[in-house]
Amino acid sequence: MATEATTGCDSQTANKVKIGAYMLMNGDRPCKVMEAAKSKPGKHGTAKIRFVGLDIFTSKKYDHIASAGATVQVPTVTKIDWKLEEITESNKLKISRELRQGESKAATQNKDGEEPSSNEGQPDKSISKKEMRKLNKLKKAGMLNDEQQATLEDVGPAMISSDDVKVVTKEISMPPNEELVDKIKSAVDGGGSVYVTVISSMGKELVHAVRTK
């Protein structure tokens, strides 16, 4: 039975985990393996491997020692590019991406692993992409009337733009890395389209990088 610490993980023998792969360290921390040093078998024991990894969310370094044949937990890690729509008044990032029919819904999950919905149990409401852009521009300019504000709130985090493409929007916290925050703000000030890469694993997510187009 999967526990909270191993949900979203696969099991693998330690000697198959390579540098650059991911594994759980310190109990429940998803880390990228930076070093893997294998020792020779002792007189009464098997070979051991010393892993050094960086936490993908905090960049904290962890050590993990395991027998070569021991079972370790390998988390599923995804990196997905989202378009940055705006930096909200609460200093969060409003991001969006197109989700095509048949594509995994994992990319739309929030930090709790649930579909981001402000209208639980209610049917999705939708407007066109053109209308959404118009409303967002009016919101930035502080010119939304009550009806337009209500429309934005009713649509919630997602809208349907066609039969096979769903434009998903959600808010995500600024990354803790101040240098990355400065890059994001500079990219927004510079104009053009801004995209952020969101790394996700085990129900958590973090803005990992930014680029312009």
Image (tube, rainbow, N blue to C red):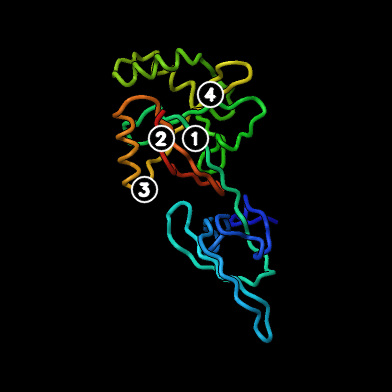
Instruction: Work out which quarter of the rendered image holds the C terminus and state it.
Output: top left
On residue 167, the disc is 4
Viewer-nearest of discs 3 and 1: 1
Q: Earlier in the sequence, mark 1 or mark 4?
A: 1
Number of marks in the rendered image:
4
Query: What's the CA distance linking mark 2 and mark 4?
Result: 20 Å
Instruction: Work out which quarter of the rendered image holds the N terminus and state it.
Output: bottom right
**Residue with the mark numbered 1:** 81
Image vertical order of residue 50 relative to residue 93, above or below: below
What is the secondary structure assignment of the residue under circle 3?
Answer: loop
On residue 211, the disc is 2
On residue 176, the disc is 3
What is the secondary structure assignment of the residue under circle 2?
Answer: strand
What amino acid is at disc 2?
Answer: Arg
Residue 198 lies left or right of residue 40; in this view the side is left
Image vertical order of residue 151 relative to residue 99, above or below: above
What is the secondary structure assignment of the residue under circle 4?
Answer: strand
Query: What's the CA distance linking mark 3 and mark 2?
Result: 17 Å
Query: What's the CA distance linking mark 4 and mark 3?
Result: 27 Å
What amino acid is at disc 4?
Answer: Val
Q: Earlier in the sequence, mark 2 or mark 1?
A: 1
Q: Residue at x 37, y 28 (%)?
A: 86
Indicate the position of residue 83 as horizontal and vertical percent values. 45, 29
Viewer-nearest of discs 2 and 4: 2
